[in-house]
Amino acid sequence: MPVKTGDSSLWRHSAFVRLWCGTILSALADSAFFLLLSWFIVDVTGSEAVLGTTLICMSIPRLLFMLLGGVAADRWSRKWIMFGSIFARGLILLLFSLLLAIDGGGWLPYSAYAVAVLFGMVDAFFWPARSSILPFLVPREQLAKANSMMEISQQISTVGGPLVSALLIRSAHYPLMFLILGVCFLAGTCFIFALRLPPAAAEGAPGPASTESSSYFKDLFSGIRYTFSVPILSIIFVTSLFTNMTFSGPINMGLPLLVKSLGWNGSAYSSLSITLGIGMIAGGILTGLCNGFRGKFMLLPLILAVMGLSISSLFFMQHLALGYAAMLIIGLALSMTNIPYITYIQSIVPAHILGRVMSLLSLMSIGLGPVSYAICSFVLEHKVATPAVIMLAGGLGLAVIAMGLLMFREVRQMERHPAWSRSNHSEQSHPLSS
């Protein structure tokens, strides 16, 4: 683990600054690519079926390879895994740009399918490595602030990605658009390449469950067994799964349909989405200022319940003001719960298995999003419920699940975990300078 320091400024940790810069460049390009690829397919092919198939081609490899990415993060250098993932994404887009410039899209839709599959595969390896490397870069007492800054970088990309894609789309030259995004990814690799890591992070952290001679899949299943053998981890992961299921589909599918049914235009939907991103940025800042709510974890289920009630309140939306308030609160609550739980996991999980545990968390919180989309699509297509009812039901379900967390002794006593207590003692022994 990194050497402890009394310096309160994360920006004086050069390794963290390089990781943050590389991540934000990658995240901005990632967000812009997702929107640009979707628009490109709709604009060139005019087929909703091709768009759906392309998104599935990206989601399934990401889902399948995310857990393997966790094993890789525990076995090999996290720095070079991140470098390879960002570099590969840049190279994929450069080759796609070249192909479009040569044949003008004659290989569509198969070239788009290939790009989506390859992109999803290499992207899946980045997140477990990035999540598990952070505890090696900053002192434990600054881990909550570091996670807050990484969350803020993600939300900056959520707001900035659409702006970047909008500027690129104005050029109406798709080979140039994908070329620029590819260069952005390659620029991100410069920061990752410059990382200077402690030996444990640079070489991986092999332990009892992960050795060079062990089977890759044996390591994978040992990580899953470990996660669900620790009750509090099981509770956090299942909660993350239900949060994702009740948020992804209802908000990402139900909200635009509700906006359309109210007779509002696309700018109204965009402004609601931007408000969500602003809320998440503000939540990340607030969580960092509150040191990840250390010592106040009993508030987290209540915050999650407020998020659920805010999702439900969209059922009553007749004016944009209510929508803005609800989306702002949802964004705040997402960051204010995600960051403390991630910091907690990073603090209590042994280093040699952290990559696999974080990859499983990513799978729960990101990878299973398509399942939520599929359920919502089925419900909407068969007229089982309206978009407003989906958000009402999903939000109320999340609120009930959140309040139910307080019934578990493991949740009420989670801050008594020995590793978390040692982390707290370390913070008190090395107070931050003002």
Image (tube, rainbow, N blue to C red):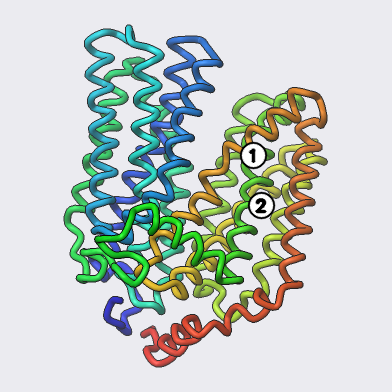
Question: Camera-side residue: 392 or 213?
Answer: 213
Q: Do the residues bearing badges 2 and 1 touch, measured as CB atoms within 8 Å?
A: no
How far apart, in angstroms, are the residues tagged by discs 2 and 1?
Answer: 10 Å
Determine whether the residue tagged by mark 2 lies in a helix, strand or loop.
Answer: helix
In the rendered image, the residue lying farthest to the bottom is 429
- Which callout, 2 or 1, points at the residue further toward the start of the chain? 2
Q: Is residue 56 left or right of residue 255?
A: left
Residue depicted at x 54% and y 58%: 282
Residue depicted at x 47% and y 82%: 419
Question: Camera-side residue: 40 or 377?
Answer: 377
Residue position for label 1: 372
Residue type pointed to by label 1: Ser
Quadrant assignment for the C terminus: bottom left
Residue 242, position as x, y percentages in the image: 66, 52
Residue 137, position as x, y percentages in the image: 30, 69
Q: Looking at the image, is 188 positioned above or below residue 400?
A: above
Res 242 label: 2
Can residue 286 be seen here? The reply is no
Residue type pointed to by label 2: Phe
State which quadrant residue 427 falls in. bottom left
State which quadrant residue 92 falls in. top left
Q: Residues within 10 Å of mark 1 (few under 14, many from 20)?
A: some
Determine whether the residue tagged by mark 1 lies in a helix, strand or loop.
Answer: helix
Residue depicted at x 35% and y 34%: 119
